[in-house]
Image: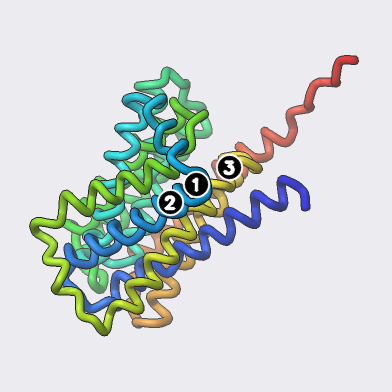
Amino acid sequence: MTDQTKGLLLTFLGVICIVPEALFVRVIDAPTLTLAFWKVALVGVAISVGLLVIQGTAPFRALRQGGWASAIYVGGAACAGVGFVLAVRLTSVANVVFILASLPVFAALYSRVFLGEAISRRMLFTIAAVLLGLAVIAYGSGTSENASLAGDLVALAISAIFAAALTAARHARAISMVPAVALAYLIAAIAVLPIADPLAMPASEMPQLALYALFIGLSTGLISLGPRYISSAEVGLLVLLESVLAPLLVWAVLGEDPGIYALIGGGIVLGALFLSNLIALSRRRRVVPPMPRH
């Protein structure tokens, strides 16, 4: 199996594992913060134990080399871990995943401001299209089923915060951020514990909760491995699958109609990002590698 095939397969499986997350948040019958607590606590413990068994404490000690970048990533991942549950409970699943798809736009802006990376003409057109799509989604939130502007704003905040975390991770790209996810989730669990009421989780929901945590843990590991073998543009194209499949899954299982505005706005966002990543990928493949020196 080539590195290309391995990277595509790992990323694809990781995306498939993350697709049911919104459905789990919808069907698990527990208070919002209780569910958020158990999600971050179980996933944080699972990833931590897995890393300690396989690699010992080395991955966690390596985070210190990242300095402020590691700290920002931990903070962003902690907010995203809890925030996703809040957003899905407040607005429609389609709105959440379509808005979260805007993350690359925030990342490009942060990279320009904090890392001094230029924004290409391609990215400027992408940003304009994504903003248009988000405006359409926001406009329809007052009419679409289960949609609300408050939930949309939570999703937008998650997108902006986690984009900052990814930008920090790019600054410290030599360091694996998988242990940072574990640390972030454990910190998030401790932060929400005083107001989460963990005992409010019904015993009957524990099997679904365990399956939810398993899917998230697998997704985190698989998607983090993908960029080792394929480009960020290829990873970005595959990750867009979640934004398409997650609302379709919830629609099929629970009958939650995304609404025409979410579909139009989401189509604009996903179409712009798909085209942008496709152009980036084609340009990368047109670059002729230098001849080896003997």
Q: Which residue is mark 1?
A: 273
On the image, the x and y values in percent for residue 148 come to: 19, 63
Q: Tell me the element at label 2.
A: helix
Tag 2 and tag 3, C-beta contact below 8 Å? no
**Looking at the image, can residue 127 be seen?**
no
Q: Which residue is mark 2?
A: 269
Residue drawn at x 48%, y 51% as measured from the top left: 53
Tag 2 and tag 1, C-beta contact below 8 Å? yes
Q: Is residue 185 above or below residue 151?
A: above
22 vs 230, left or right, is left
Q: Is residue 35 above or below residue 46?
A: below
Label 2, label 3: how far apart the Cα atoms are: 23 Å
Q: Is residue 202 above or below residue 42?
A: below
Q: Tell me the element at label 1.
A: helix
Residue drawn at x 37%, y 65% as measured from the top left: 213
Lower sequence index among marks 1 and 3? 3
On the image, the x and y values in percent for residue 1 come to: 78, 53
On the image, the x and y values in percent for residue 192 come to: 15, 54
Residue drawn at x 39%, y 77% as measured from the top left: 251
Kindly give the residue lying farthest to the left in the view shown: 195
Front residue of 109 and 260: 109
287 vs 77, left or right, is right
Front residue of 96 and 273: 96
Q: Which residue is mark 3?
A: 227
Nearest to viewer (mark 2 / mark 3): 3
Label 2, label 1: how far apart the Cα atoms are: 6 Å
Q: Tell me the element at label 3.
A: helix
Front residue of 28 and 291: 28
147 vs 24, left or right, is left
